[in-house]
Image (tube, grey):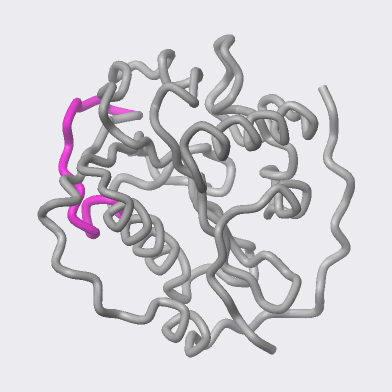
Amino acid sequence: MTRRLKPLEVGHLGALPCECEGCVFWETDSRLEARCGAACDIAMLRDWYGTVCREWGDCGRVASEDDEVLGFIKYAPARYFPQASYFPSGPPSENAVLLACIHIRDDARRHGLGRLLLQAALKDLSLRGERCVEAYAFANGGNMNAVPVMGVEFLLRHGFTVSRPHPTFPLLKLDLRSLVTWTENLEAVLDSLRIPIGAPRRVPSPSIE
């Protein structure tokens, strides 16, 4: 079994973990409940992906074992995520790349995969010349798999600071220019993680709303 870090591709969109299959929470321009799967439309997601890739470039990273997606992180300039305008801590900066969400398969959690995906995203953005990254965070704990943002403690541990406080959904930021030069082979780190992956799952068809 070989593990790889790859750019998020259109073929991955229907095989993402949990409620993420076909989820267009971030891509929807009407207000939604802050919940994974609040709106699902695989055709819309593929159109969104094609637009972002043509106009800006790769918009995420996936960690995979052979053909199975273990987890992913999605990011793009804030203008590509209209749902961000409804967050109570205010809209992201115009010049920032927004880390929208990160999700890990249940049987691959708590083994460092989230940290690795975040580092892969930051490395990609740093090498592309981006300067600022922002992310909404969830400050109430609980089941992070059901929330379309990252945990506040996770982001704080990895160098983010609070840009706009809020008791539930603060906005955090990271200056990519403050990061040290990237020397770590992240793919080699991924392959060395002791993740007790079970049998390949059957991927259900994404629901359409």
201, 80: nearer the viewer: 80
Does the segment drawn in magenta span residue 98?
no
Magenta part of the chain: 154-168
54, 204: nearer the viewer: 54
146, 94: nearer the viewer: 94
Query: How many badges with numbers are in the image?
Result: 0
Residue at x 45%, y 86% (from the top left corner): 188
x then y, percent, for residue 45 = 69, 33
Quadrant that contains the C terminus: top right
- In the displayed orientation, state which residue is furthest to the left: 178
x then y, percent, for residue 47 = 70, 29
- Where is residue 198, by image quadrant? bottom right
x then y, percent, for residue 139 = 33, 38
Residue at x 22%, y 59% (from the top left corner): 157
Going by the image, does 92 lie left or right of 194?
A: left
Quadrant that contains the N terminus: bottom right
Residue at x 20%, y 45% (from the top left corner): 174
x then y, percent, for residue 167 = 27, 27
Going by the image, does 39 lie left or right of 169?
A: right
